[in-house]
Amino acid sequence: MKATALDLSIVVPVFNEVENLRPLVHAVRQALVDIDAWELLLVDDGSTDGTRELARSLAQDEGPVRLISMARNFGQTAAMQAGFDAARGAVVVSMDGDLQNDPADIPRLLEKLGEGYDLVAGYRVDRQDTLITRKVPSWVANRIIAWLTGVSIRDNGCSLKAYRRELFDRVVLYSDMHRFIPAMAVATAGARVAEIPVRHHARRAGQSKYGLSRIWKVLSDLLAIKMISSFRNRPLVMFGLGAAIATGFAVVFFVLTLLSVPGGLREGMAYTFVFPSIVLVWVTLAVYLLLLGLIAEVVIRGDRLSRDVPLPVAREWS
Amino acid sequence: MNEPPRKPDGGSRVAELALGQGPRSTTDPDVSVLVPVSERPDPLADLYLEVAGALRDSGRTCEFVFVAEPFNLDAVEALRPLAESDEPIRVLEAGHTVGESTLLKLGAARARGRVLLVLPAYHRVVPEVLPALVEVVEQGADLANCRRWPRHDSWLNRIQTRLLHSIVTGLSSGHVRDVGSGVRAMRPEVLRELPLYGDLFRFLPVLALRDGYSVVEIEGAQHPLDARLRIYGPGTYLRRAIDVLGLFFLSRFTYKPLRFFGLIGSALGFVGGVILLIMFIQRLGGQGLANRPLLLLAVLLFTLGVQAVALGLIGEIIVHFNAPSRRAYRVRDTAGEEAEEPGGVDGSSEKAETAFRTGV
């Protein structure tokens, strides 16, 4: 797949962007006049408006443009991963297909990457989106992601990012993980991450594909990303902590039991089954969590036994 | 060649061994009719004569591949006279009981036809509709499902499957309305590439749709022999319901188990938490706790919620560590510089370049 090595691959997932496609290719071409060996990978994610047909003709007629068309609409994460899998460049840049990102920022991303980073994320200044449904949720989400994962990225929602290709030997996107690429890259590959400001334009044509409905999904994904970024190599610690908390509650109710039995410290309180039963419930939970933690260790062990897990990226100097 | 012993779960392994077939030759039949012979088949010779007649009348050459479980060898033995009189019948006998999904995989690996026609070992639809079904695939669809319509059986037959069928139809966005007919024509690649195990064979059209194959449903009149009244034991209904639950979970949450378990867990935990909060406030108001069993219920609900979320996290760990070795998408085709045209045919042919396969 990576027969010829290139300098740069631009990966652009497109979904029903027929009007933006030609201007996009044009803008990329203009932005990259100084770079020799590059390719533009258009990943059509099951469009129904003729995007695929147009992209195919662009790919056949215009220099370094390639089309990967997904068998159906698999979502943005899968489309990006398909692009990353097919990319041949030493550096990969991802970008939105709606021209809200400006390809003219790509050279600056590359420059920053050249300073010794593995991932450079753009953050949108002067963002051209509605305040309530787009900017506020995004601001809150970015703060929570930073707090949970310890990877402080101002704008996770900005697709314009540059990566060293080695990252993709170590980071594989699944589910809706495209929102958390920097956090994943740090957790699983030890990536060095930098940020630079990028331009943001209002949508010229086509429809926005996002809405508020994704909040619940993001919350659930946040919990998953928290676990993976903090405990992916030692899940037993996480489940053990849970078990310890449950044991703590068991102890509390055990003490309450002692206090409430006849002849206890506070005589006269009715003896019931309630507190002892609750002790058992918490003990059960603690045991259960410990066992689950062991299962998680089995899963990881199986992974390490069945394949060569790449070591994190690391810089060397002498 | 000495074959290694078959493993109990060795469906794909068996298929792999079997795939050592040569390149497709010009004598390959137009249609391979694939019949898994599992529980309680109709007389297979009758089925063969009926279907082979219909396919030949339409001018197509065909071969029949019967794949039988070892407990059903008597049923396929009835085909021996036909096979010996040079009818195009091939019989594969599994070494031990492998389940219908694996029977299909095994048959698909050995079949030589350009189109695969999968039939259950019962008369389901009138044979006249089968050439039309094959033609849908010949004209470009990846899979054609046959819906039994119009139906002649009693409402009692239909009502008992109504609920589960409507769920499956919903999961297929209305594309598949009769998943129970089991009569399907498809390109052989579909069956060879789809991960199929356990009872998932029932939902083949839905799984194909979710992997991005084009699925078409056409109508064919129900076979008179299919119209007899069927009453199953309660275990059968329970298994079907569990199958549909499994399909629902796998098709929505294979790559995001926490969204499912998290929803259940937070609902349980929320109810438990609210009760706990109310009781805590009442405790501050002076009401004792030790004699209120409701407290036990609240704690139980809360810990159940924690358990559900914890299981979801285990699911996420499994998905995370499996991610490097599989891809959650399927590529239809590629174009542009140095793109290998699949099979060297014209660009319009939609042969899937399947470097990767999806989860479900």
Image (cartoon, coloured by chain):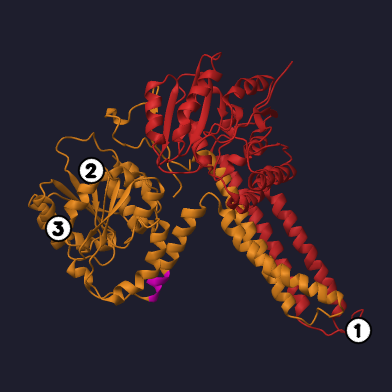
Chain colours: A red, B orange
Q: In this view, does B228 lie to the left or right of A305?
A: left
| Mark 3 touches mark 1? (CB < 8 Å) | no
How far across and down, in percent of the image, does residue A200 sit? 62, 32
Mark 1 falls on what kind of element?
Answer: loop
Looking at the rendered image, the quarter that the C terminus of chain A falls into is top right
State the residue position of label 2: B139
A43 or B207, which lies in front? Answer: A43
Identity of the residue drawn at 48% across and 40% down: B327
Quadrant position of residue A94: top right
Count neighbours of disc 3 (C-alpha within 10 A) and say few if under 14, some if 14 to 19, many if 20 or more.
some
Residue range of the region highlighted in magenta in the rendering: B234-238
Query: What's the CA distance linking mark 2 and mark 3?
Result: 18 Å
Q: Determine the main secondary structure of the stretch shown in magenta.
A: helix
x, y percentage for residue B76?
19, 59
Q: Which chain carries label 1?
A: A
Q: Name the residue under label 1.
A: A267
Q: Is mark 3 on a helix, strand or loop?
A: helix
* Residue named by callout 3: B128
